[in-house]
Amino acid sequence: QVQLVESGGGLVQPGGSLRLSCAASGSIFSIYTMGWYRQAPGKQRELVARITSGGFTTWSDSVKGRFTISRDNAKKTVYLQMNSLKPEDTAVYYCNAFFVGGMSRSMEDYWGQGTQVTVSS
């Protein structure tokens, strides 16, 4: 079985910072991409940022210059450093991993359980 365990969400004032972490564990042969998506109430889930094993990144325009994504391949962990947070960043943030399964040796797509980020004064 594969698990994605997220941590680091919470309540922060506008202009503040938070750091999210997501650690993958279980039957994984290799991970291609890891990333973060978010879903605000009444809205569709959207990409925030994702990073490949080689370090190539894709970003949402709404967070460019404020958020940083990084990855520790040895620890199968992805991080999202969020600075200059705005109320519109409030959402449930979900970790995603696209990888080759250790047993199946086929491509698999997993999601974490989500962590709430609330930006409010």
Image (cartoon, grey):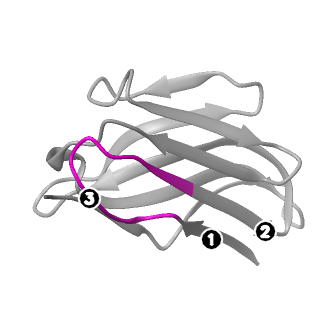
Which residue matches tag 2? 25
For the residues marked 3 and 1, what is the alpha-carbon distance in whole angstroms?
17 Å
From which residue to which does the magenta span run? 8-20
Element assignment for label 3: strand
Asked if marks 2 and 3 touch (Cβ < 8 Å), the reply is no
Query: Which mark is on residue 86?
Result: none
Asked if marks 1 and 2 touch (Cβ < 8 Å), the reply is yes
> Magenta stretch: residue 13 in it?
yes
Q: Dot 3, crowdedness within 10 Å: few (<14), some or many (≥20)?
A: many
Using the image, determine if residue 85 lies above or below residue 5: above
Q: Quadrant of residue 51?
A: top right
Element assignment for label 1: strand
Q: Is residue 30 left or right of residue 43?
A: right
Q: Quadrant of residue 32?
A: top right
Element assignment for label 2: strand
Q: Residue at x 44, y 59 (%)?
A: 94
Viewer-proximal residue among 85 and 59: 85
Residue 92 appears at what percent x and percent y? Answer: 32, 63
Using the image, determine if residue 30 lies above or below residue 28: above
Q: Dot 2, crowdedness within 10 Å: few (<14), some or many (≥20)?
A: some
Using the image, determine if residue 76 lies above or below residue 41: above
For the residues marked 2 and 3, what is the alpha-carbon distance in whole angstroms?
25 Å
Query: Which mark is on residue 91?
Result: 3
Q: Residue at x 48, y 74 (%)?
A: 113
Viewer-proximal residue among 113 and 12: 12
Q: Which amino acid does the dot numbered 3 rest on?
A: Ala
Query: Which mark is on residue 5?
Result: 1
